[in-house]
Image (spheres, grey):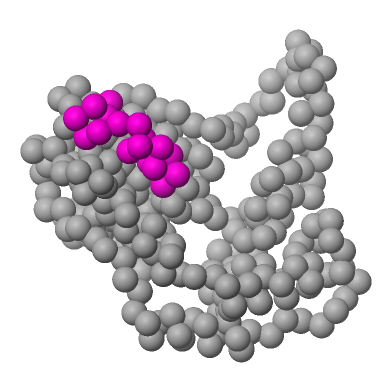
C-alpha cells in the first residue's frame, strides 16, 4: 500500500534514491557485544532514587539493558520503517558543499495537495511522525490525500549525512538545507513547515529566511535571548500556576541543555562510547522534558 504513496510529483528537480534500511548483521552483533560489555556503575545513594530527581536509577538501567539484549527486535522496527516510502537526495548547500538528506514521505497525486515538512527535535528522529503517516495512509489514497508529507532526518541526525567536519551545523544552515530539500522536491511555489523542540527553531527560521515557506506551526516557542519577560498581571490563575512550574523546571531541569550548549564535544564523545551511556543520557532528557 505504501508504494502507491511513493511516487513523487513530476516536477521534482533532483534525483531521488529509494532507500531500504538494512543494517548489516555484523553491525548488529557488534552493537550487541558492546552492549553486553557495557558495565553498570556501583550502587550509590543517588542512583537508588526512583523519582528521577537525580536522573536514571541503577535498577532501571539494569532492567533496560536486559530487555535490550533479550527481547528487543531491531528487524521488527526496521521492517516498520521500510513499510513507508523512504528516500535519499543530495542537497547542495554551497558551491563547494553538499549533503545527503534522508526523508520518509507520503506523496499525493492531487494537483492542489499542500506540501508539509515535519521537523523532529532531540532526542528524537523522523520516526516520531510515522504513526501519523500510518493514520493518513489508512484514511486516504494517493488520489485523495490532501497533503504531501515530508518527514526528514535533520542534518547530522540518523540517516542524513553531514556537510563537512570543518563546518558547524548551525540552525540557519539546517533551515537552509531543509528549504533546499523542499525546493528540490518541486515545492518552490510554497510549503508549510511544522516542528517541535529543535525542529520548531528550524521551522521558524525557514519561515523568516526563505520565501518558499508560506506558513509554519510549532509546539515550542522561546523568547529571543535578552528579551524582556512580558507582564504577568493579566494572567489567569491556571496560567500563573503553569508559569511557576516552568520556573521550577528551569532551576533543576535545564542542566542537560546547558551541557549540550557549552560542552557539545565532551557530551558527544562520552555518550557515543557506549549504548548504555547514550540510553542513560536520553532517559535524563526525556524525564526532564516530560515534566510538563
x then y, percent, for residue 40: 72, 81
x then y, percent, for residue 52: 80, 57
x then y, percent, for residue 210: 29, 32
Residue range of the region highlighted in magenta in the rendering: 130-146
The residue lying at 36 percent from left, 62 percent from top is 79
Does 20 appear above or below 139?
A: below
Q: Quadrant of residue 142?
A: top left
Does 279 appear above or below 179?
A: below
**Which residue, as the protein is rendered here, is positioned at the far left?**
10
The reply, left or right, for residue 26 in relation to residue 223 is left
Q: Quadrant of residue 231?
A: top right
> 127 or 273, which is in the foreground?
127
> 144 or 45, which is in the foreground?
144
The residue lying at 8 percent from left, 38 percent from top is 10
In reply to whether residue 143 is colored magenta, the answer given is yes
Q: Quadrant of the C terminus?
A: top right
The residue lying at 18 percent from left, 27 percent from top is 110
Amino acid at each position: 500500500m505504501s508504494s502507491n504513496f511513493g511516487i513523487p510529483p513530476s516536477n521534482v528537480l533532483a534525483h531521488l534514491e529509494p532507500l531500504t534500511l538494512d543494517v548489516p548483521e555484523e553491525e548488529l552483533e557488534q552493537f550487541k557485544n558492546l552492549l553486553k560489555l557495557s558495565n553498570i556503575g556501583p550502587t550509590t545513594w543517588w542512583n537508588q532514587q526512583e523519582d528521577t530527581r537525580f536522573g536514571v536509577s541503577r535498577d532501571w538501567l539494569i532492567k533496560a539493558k536486559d530487555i535490550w539484549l533479550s527481547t528487543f527486535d531491531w528487524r521488527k522496527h526496521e521492517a516498520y520503517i521500510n513499510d513507508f516510502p523512504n528516500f535519499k537526495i543530495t542537497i547542495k548547500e554551497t558551491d563547494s558543499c553538499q549533503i545527503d538528506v534522508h526523508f520518509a514521505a507520503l506523496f499525493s497525486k492531487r494537483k492542489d495537495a499542500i506540501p508539509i515538512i515535519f521537523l523532529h527535535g532531540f532526542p528524537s528522529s523522523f520516526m516520531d511522525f510515522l504513526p501519523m503517516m500510518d493514520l493518513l495512509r489508512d484514511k486516504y489514497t494517493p488520489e485523495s490525500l490532501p497533503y504531501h508529507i515530508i518527514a526528514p532526518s535533520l542534518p547530522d541526525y540518523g540517516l542524513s549525512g553531514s556537510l563537512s567536519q570543518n563546518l558547524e551545523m548551525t540552525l540557519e544552515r539546517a533551515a537552509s538545507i531543509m528549504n533546499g530539500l523542499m525546493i528540490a522536491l518541486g515545492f518552490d511555489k510554497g510549503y508549510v513547515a511544522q516542528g517541535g523542540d529543535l525542529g520548531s527553531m528550524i521551522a521558524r527560521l525557514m519561515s523568516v529566511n526563505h520565501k518558499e515557506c508560506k506558513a509554519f506551526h510549532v509546539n515550542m516557542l522561546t523568547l529571543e535571548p535578552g528579551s524582556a519577560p512580558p507582564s504577568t498581571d493579566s494572567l489567569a490563575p491556571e496560567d500563573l500556576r503553569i508559569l511557576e512550574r516552568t520556573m521550577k523546571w528551569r532551576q533543576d531541569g535545564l542542566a542537560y541543555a546547558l551541557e549540550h550548549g557549552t560542552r557539545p564535544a565532551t557530551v558527544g564523545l562520552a555518550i557515543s562510547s557506549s549504548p548504555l551511556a547514550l540510553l542513560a543520557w536520553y532517559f535524563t532528557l526525556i524525564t526532564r522534558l516530560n515534566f510538563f
